[in-house]
Image (cartoon, rainbow, N blue to C red):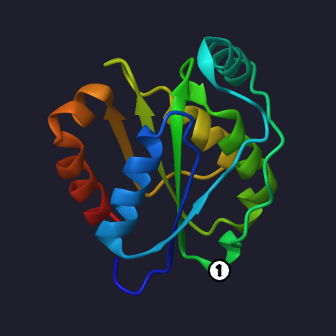
C-alpha cells in the first residue's frame, strides 16, 4: 500500500456489500463513498428488476458523489452481483468517472457459490485491468471467512 491514496466506492442493496466495504476501509484506513441509487429496489420486485436491468447493462439515476476519484491513486469498486453483472448504480458511477481512475481494484458480493463472472464486466466497463479482485459469497459472510479474504485482498494493493 505504501503512500497510496485509496478510495472505496460501493453500492449495496441489502447491506452485505456495505459491510464488506467498511471492513476494507477499516483495514486500510482509507476514504469511502457510498453510491445511492434513486430507483426503489426493495422487495422481490426490486430484486427481479435489478437483476434484469444489470443483465441488460442498464444504468440508473444516482445521487451525485461527494468525493472525486481523481484525487486517489487507487479506487476500489465494490458491487453486489446481479445476474452475473455489475449493479446498475456502480455501472453508472463507472460510466461517469472511469476516465478519472488511475488504478482500480474490484470487490463483488454474491449469494451463490459460482464463479465471479462480474469481474470481466467491471474490467470492460472501466477499460482497466484491476490491481486485484475479491469475491465474497454469503457462505463467507456466515463463516466470518470474509475477514481473512479482505486481509489478503488489501495486502495485494
Percent x, y for residue 50?
67, 22
Which of the 4 image quarters holds residue 120?
Answer: top right
Q: State the image coordinates of residue 43 (x, y, percent, origin top left).
A: 61, 18
- Image check: 35 left or right of 7? right
Q: Which residue is mark 1?
A: 71
**Mark 1, residues whose alpha carbon is within 10 Å: few (<14), some, or many (≥20)?**
some
Quadrant housing the N terminus: bottom left
Q: Nearer the viewer, residue 71 or 80?
A: 80
Q: x, y percentage for residue 16?
A: 42, 39
Q: Nearer the viewer, residue 14 or 7?
A: 14
Relative horizontal placement of residue 86, taking residue 31 as reference (left or right)? right
Residue 37's image quarter? top right
- On the rendered structure, is 13 left or right of 105? right
- Seen from the viewer's position, the closer of residues 28 and 143 is 143
- Residue 143 lies left or right of residue 79; in this view the side is left
Residue 131 quadrant:
bottom left
Which residue occupies 65% across, 39% down? 124
Q: Is residue 91 above or below residue 49?
A: below
Nearest to the observer: residue 153 or residue 13: 13
Q: Secondary structure at mark 1?
A: helix
Which residue is located at x 53 percent, y 21 percent? 84
- Name above or below for residue 71 compared with residue 13: below
Q: Quadrant of the C terminus?
A: bottom left
Residue in the picture at 45% in, 38% down: 108
Amino acid at each position: 500500500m505504501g503512500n497510496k491514496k485509496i478510495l472505496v466506492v460501493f453500492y449495496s442493496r441489502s447491506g452485505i456489500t456495505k459491510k464488506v466495504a467498511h471492513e476494507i476501509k477499516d483495514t486500510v484506513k482509507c476514504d469511502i463513498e457510498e453510491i445511492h441509487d434513486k430507483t426503489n429496489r426493495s422487495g422481490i420486485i426490486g430484486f427481479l428488476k435489478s437483476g434484469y436491468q444489470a443483465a441488460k447493462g442498464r444504468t440508473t439515476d444516482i445521487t451525485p458523489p461527494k468525493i472525486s476519484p481523481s484525487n486517489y491513486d487507487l479506487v476500489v469498486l465494490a458491487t453486489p452481483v446481479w445476474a452475473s453483472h455489475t449493479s446498475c448504480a456502480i455501472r453508472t458511477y463507472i460510466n461517469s468517472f472511469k476516465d478519472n481512475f488511475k488504478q482500480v481494484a474490484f470487490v463483488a458480493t454474491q449469494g451463490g457459490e459460482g464463479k465471479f463472472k462480474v469481474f470481466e464486466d467491471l474490467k470492460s466497463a472501466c477499460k482497466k485491468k484491476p490491481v486485484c479482485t475479491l469475491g465474497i459469497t454469503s457462505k463467507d459472510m456466515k463463516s466470518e471467512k470474509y475477514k481473512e479474504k479482505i486481509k489478503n485482498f488489501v495486502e495485494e494493493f
